[in-house]
Amino acid sequence: MDEVFEEDAHKPRSAKDVAERLLALMAITSRAFEDVAEQSLSWVKENKIDLYFSSEEKSFYFSQIKPRDKDRTNFSWRLEAAIPLIWALGGMETLPPLTESAKISDYEITNLAYDNPQKFLTSAELRPNAEIEEAESEHYNQHWRVRDAQLFKKPMPMELDPSIVYERRYALSWLVGYGDDWDNVPTDT
């Protein structure tokens, strides 16, 4: 008798999910870099971007007190998580090296997302799932190399920035369907 194996319990995110997540990250990271979030807040309210925020993002974004430096730093790193989303939506040909920090305003797709969020949402299309799965697998392997260096006190591979690797891996793992929501994506190695 042939054994039947249950397929992985994860379901890849839709183009709409990814586009909404990118809008949320654009807002959250702008809040992390702004002392006064008036411009960002206006854009978020006008376009109802807060509907796409995770629980942690809502708490951070709408805090009535100035966010702690640690929180601002942590949320600012989400710029790196935006890079795989931009790539998955076809906004760049290849993912940049894992030592190259993101500048999301360099990509036409993020300018469209900012200028016309509704058009951006309705026109969103994803790369083939096989390409996204392959990228996630590659980033999993690079994340393991980072953890190996950290755990065994080895030199960090020069081609890897641990924070960039983590953020991009997080986004790719979310893209392929790991985690119940954005705030809870497993990144085990």
Image (cartoon, rainbow, N blue to C red):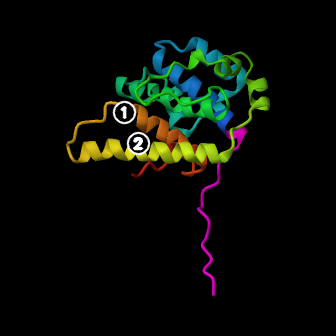
Image side of residue 100 versus residue 153, left or right: right
| Residue 91 falls within the magenta-colored stretch | no
What kind of residue is marked 2? Gln
Name the residue at 62% across, 19% down: 107
Quarter assignment of residue 131: top right
168 vs 119, nearest the viewer: 168
Q: Which residues are magenta?
A: 1-17
Check disc 2 and report its element: helix, strand or loop.
helix
Q: Is residue 179 above or below residue 104?
A: below
Q: Position of residue 93 (x, y in %)?
A: 62, 28
Residue picked out by circle 2: 142
Residue picked out by circle 1: 160
Image side of residue 169 versus residue 113, left or right: left
Characterize the local packing of mark 2: few (<14), some (14-19) or many (20 or more) Cα atoms within 10 angstroms: many
Q: Are marks 1 and 2 in contact (CB under 8 Å)?
A: yes
What kind of residue is marked 1? Leu
152 vs 43, nearest the viewer: 152
Whether residue 186 is visible here, answered yes or no, is yes
Quarter of the figure with the N terminus: bottom right
